[in-house]
Image (cartoon, helix red, strand yellow):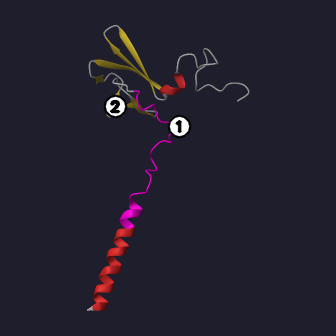
Amino acid sequence: MAQHLNKVSLLGLLLLCAGAHAQTVVDPTRPPAGLAKDQGETYAGPVLQSILISSTRRIAIISGKTVKMGDKFGEAQVISISENEVVLRTGKDKQVLKLYPSLYKPGSDSHAGASPDSPTKGK
C-alpha cells in the first residue's frame, strides 16, 4: 500500500512539474517584440495577409477572406493583385493594400520612385 502511495505521489509530482513547465513555453509564431505594432495602434480597415501568384491565377487573402481578380471584398472590387499589393476600388475611390505596410511609411523611402522589389545599387 505504501509503495502504491509513493507511485501516486511521484506521478502527481511529475504532472505538477510538467504543468508548470508548459506555462513557460513561448509561442514560436509570435513576432519579436521589436517587430510588433505599438499596443495603442489599431487599424480597422482591411488587412492584406497573403498573396499567391502562379502562372494560372492570382489570389490574395484580405482579413481572412480569399479573393481573386474581379471579386468583391465588402463594397469594394479587387482590380489588381501584384507581388506586394492589392488594389480595391469602391466607385471612383481606390485603396491600395500593401503586404508589408511598415516598409511603405511616408517619408521613409530614400529611393523615390524605386519599387521595394527592384534591386538598388550598393545593396
- Name the residue: 57% across, 16% down: 107
Residue 13 on the magenta segment: no
Quadrant (top left, top right, bottom left, bottom right) of the C terminus = top right
The residue under the point 47% across, 36% down is 36
Say which quarter of the image contains residue 50: top left
Q: Position of residue 31 (x, y in %)?
A: 48, 42
The amino acid beneath tag 1 is Gly
What segment is highlighted magenta in the picture? 18-41
Q: Position of residue 51 (x, y in %)?
A: 43, 32
Up-down relation of residue 39 to residue 6 (above or below): above
Q: In this rendering, does residue 114 appear at all? A: yes
Q: Quadrant of residue 92?
A: top left
**Residue type of the residue flagged with mark 2:** Ser
At a point 50% along the width and 40% down the height, the residue shown is: 33
Return the residue at label 2: 63
Q: Are dots 2 and 1 in contact, CB under 8 Å?
A: no
Does dot 1 land on a helix, a strand or a loop? loop
Which label sits on residue 34? Answer: 1
| Crowd around label 2: few <14 · some 14–19 · many ≥20 (10 Å) | few
Q: Position of residue 105 (x, y in %)?
A: 52, 21
